[in-house]
Image (cartoon, coloured by chain):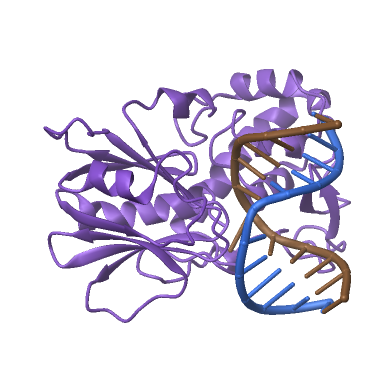
Chain colours: A purple, B blue, C brown
Amino acid sequence: LPELPEVETIRSDLVPLLTGKRILSVWVADDATRLLPHSTPELFALSVAGSTIEALARRGKYLVFTLSPQSSVLSPRFWIVHLRMTGRLLCRAASDPPDAYVRALVTLDDGHELRWSDLRKFGTWELADSLADLERKLGPEPLGDMFTVEDLQTMLLRRKAPVKAVLLDQKTLAGLGNIYVDEALYEAGVDPRRVANSVELAETTRLHAAIRSVLEQGVANRGASFSDYADASGAKGSNQLYVRVFRRTGKPCYTCGAMIERCKTGGRSTHFCPVCQK
DNA sequence: CGTTACCTGAAA
DNA sequence: TTTCAGGTAACG
């Protein structure tokens, strides 16, 4: 569900609610089998209880909580959250009505709690003393100054997979997923099935601008809620109303009127205009 | 490099 | 009953 714009919406909503708050306790359900791949509910709770949330950042599709240092030996600086397909981080008053599929709970010192809801149980929570491991698996931030046309061209020239598959690879760029890749390729007029190293500089230039613009639009519209995505208060985004190709199979292209087609590329459902995208 | 597995529920 | 879902890691 969540790609860069969705995760960024959650982050920016949570910052004023969580910064400076202390974690009192953590509960993890027995059936949250994959949530803590490198820990146990007991160890995790012991490690973060008593910490203060100093900051909340986003890196690609990851949320990164900076925790205050503790006197205890167990004192990781970072709590790294990935929502995968159906994860939600909901900030609620403890007295608010229950939410569906809540599999973990973080109690805060101001009467609020962070509820972790995850229908499909793919999401992960990890603790780390440094962000080096995270950085190793991620490319640049597509909305940052470090991401240039030249970077993108270099990354595309190195690969012979379909350009869509390369853009989905988080080592190429951190934060693009199936919605925004389809949207960016449409806006740039590039066929998603093209071999990446056949994309020419003029096309890469358009693609670079398109990636930024579709992500910025996504953030401005508070993310796309095609099915499961909800922000930290449980509300849906609106960007699903503004997409040009994603899940518009059989509908007319807004530019040329041709029918939007769907195919499989890089193992993912792919939407494109057969006329506008070359 | 492409395919599969991980889960659950909705839709075809 | 089968297929599909916005993600990623582990396969071959």
Q: Is residue A60 above or below residue A25?
A: above
Quarter of the image for residue A150 reads: top right
Location of residue A211 in the rendering, given as x and y in whole percent from the top left corner: 60, 40
In the image, what residue occupies the spot 75% across and 19% down? A157
Residue A109 to residue A5: above or below: below
Is A226 left or right of A42, judged from the image as shown? right
**Quadrant position of the C terminus of chain A in the picture:** top right
Percent position (x, y) of residue A173? 58, 32
Q: In the rendered image, which quarter contains the N terminus of chain A?
A: bottom right
Q: Residue at x 79, y 42 (%)?
A: A266
Q: Quadrant of residue A191?
A: top right
Residue A99's spot in the image, x, y percent? Answer: 40, 75
**Does A46 sit above or below residue A145?**
below
Residue A222 seen by the camera: no
**Number of marks in picture:** 0
Q: Nearer the viewer, residue A81 or A31?
A: A31
User: From this viewpoint, is residue A226 visible?
Assistant: yes
Q: Is residue A155 left or right of residue A115?
A: right
Residue A254 versus residue A100 in the image, above or below: above
Depth check: A150 or A130 in front?
A: A130
The location of residue C1, given as percent across then percent down, is 87, 76
State the residue at coordinates (40%, 71%).
Answer: A234
**Closer to us: A105 or A31:** A31
Looking at the image, which residue is at 77% across and 58% down? A255
Task: Spot the residue most to the bottom.
Answer: A97
For the residue pair A11 and A41, the one nearer the viewer reads as: A41
